[in-house]
Amino acid sequence: MNQGLVLCAALRAETGALRAGLPPTVADRVVRTGVGRSRAERAATSAPVRHASALLVAGVAGGLRADLRPGDVVVADEVRTVDGGSVHCTSARLLAARLRAAGLTVRVGPVVSCEHVVGAAERATLAATRALAVDMESAWLVGSATIPTAVVRVVADTAGEPLLRPATLGRVRSALRRLTDLGPALADWGNAVGDRTVLLAGPRSFCAGVERAIDVVDLALQQRGAPVYVRKQIVHNVHVVAELEQRGAVFVDELDEVPAEATVVFSAHGVAPAVRDDARSRGLAVVDATCPLVSKVHAEVRRFSDRGDTVLFIGHAGHEETVGTMGERPGRTVLVEDVDDARSVQVADPDQVSYLVQTTLAADEVGSIVDVLRQRFPTIQGAASEDICYATTNRQRALRAVAEDSAVVLVVGSLNSSNSLRLVEAAQRMGTPAHLIDDVDGVNLRWLGVADTVGITAGASAPTTLIDEVIDALAGLGRVHVEERQVTIENVHFTLPKEVRNP
Ligand code: SF4
């Protein structure tokens, strides 16, 4: 626990509820401020708050929005006054994620502080400013703070369920019990407060194949209008998919979900020839966003198998790239997932064997599989150049450059992103704790408690803006010094498919 954390609440009932949920070492750092602006301003200049190195304001509040219910928790990303004052609490999403993990219903948004009890009409006015909750102290407690701050409020009453009705006492009691429930998460926020260094892996985030695939959908939408159908996720990232969906892309699993003669985009991971045949027979207008480096492996499968080889494909079962690549010659390709498979795989003729590799695997793991295959099949041939693509290789090198000096590594990427998962595994093999996160909401405050150096990277399908959000959130816990470890500069670009280049 950071010894400088101070928690403030207005009422005796609130401080009591808070203390009941906090570890004893933290419970004695709860300060009662009293209700209203003047008492909050006085508390802000009191010795405990002046000497604090982090300040957390908690208590009950009035809900402003119709979709909030008594007992919901509001974490402020901004604290406002009605006259336009505003303070941002940039670690809000980290704290909210920790509270959600505790099973609480949590919203993140602005909290506004007023100098008086707010009635129904004024609540509506404040709700129109997108504020979630109203209190009477927070803005004056955190307003001039230069230390990490957080504001958490439990909704006690709403516009539809206001104070001064018979049920009020019960709702306030419920809100106070909920305040007690917040304790472990608030303590974790306090533990995570501190200055830290962020080691940023370079290269990170989008590769040329992903940029091209996103551009393909973008241009197809511009040129042909919505909807544009996309078979499978265009790239393996929930944020990219959600953004394209908003603009009119419709993601489908199989072609029978696409109306006749519509436009369909094949994803960056490639498809088997049977899928192309199906699209042709259904009269679909195909735009192929398969990454050229994946297409290269498809061509190698055809070349090796057509000269009579059994092709051992080193990859992961069920991954779209594996399914598409092996679908080139289904009768002549055999999947090898790991060293055990390499030891046991059977082929028709041990002198006619070749191997190919999924583009997004970890080079060190593939190396040990290939070693076993070479021992068993001394004449085995691989591709003329490495199949593991430049982007995968570069991101793994950059990851190692940051993981060696990091207490924890955060890899931004989605769960179905092969190259992102390989980055996590590569860090873990080095002995550094590493976690895959879709975005800042996936960060667990407990990972940060003792981590004064955090390595951050992103898989090839994850937008770089997601990294910026993580760094912003960390900056809400203390000063952040960002150091980039750039192992190489990438300048790879792929030309667009002709269907969108010359519409
Ligand atoms: Fe292409 Fe490599 Fe990017 Fe996959 S990771 S889309 S193979 S450049």
Image: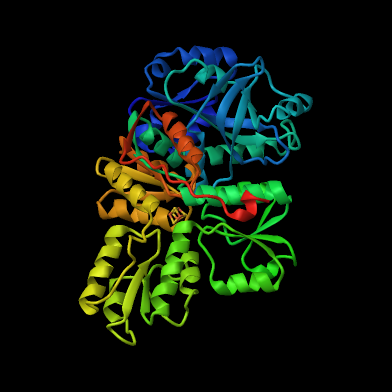
* Residue 451 vertical position relative to residue 46 in the rendered view, above or below: below
Ligand 1 lies in quarter: bottom left
Image position, residue 391 (x, y; %)? 39, 50
Frontmost residue, 354 versus 61: 354
Residue 262 position by quadrant: bottom right
Residue 172 position by quadrant: top right
Which residue lies at the image location 71% right of the left edge and 23% below the top edge?
118
Image position, residue 478 (x, y; %)? 39, 27
Which residue lies at the image location 37% right of the left edge and 76% below the top edge?
311
Q: How many marks?
A: 0
Frontmost residue, 184 versus 27: 184
Quadrant for the N terminus, please: top left
Image position, residue 491 (x, y; %)? 41, 42
Q: Is residue 267 left or right of residue 306?
A: right
Which residue lies at the image location 73% right of the left edge and 38% below the top edge?
66
Does the rendering let one see residue 102?
no
Frontmost residue, 116 versus 395: 395
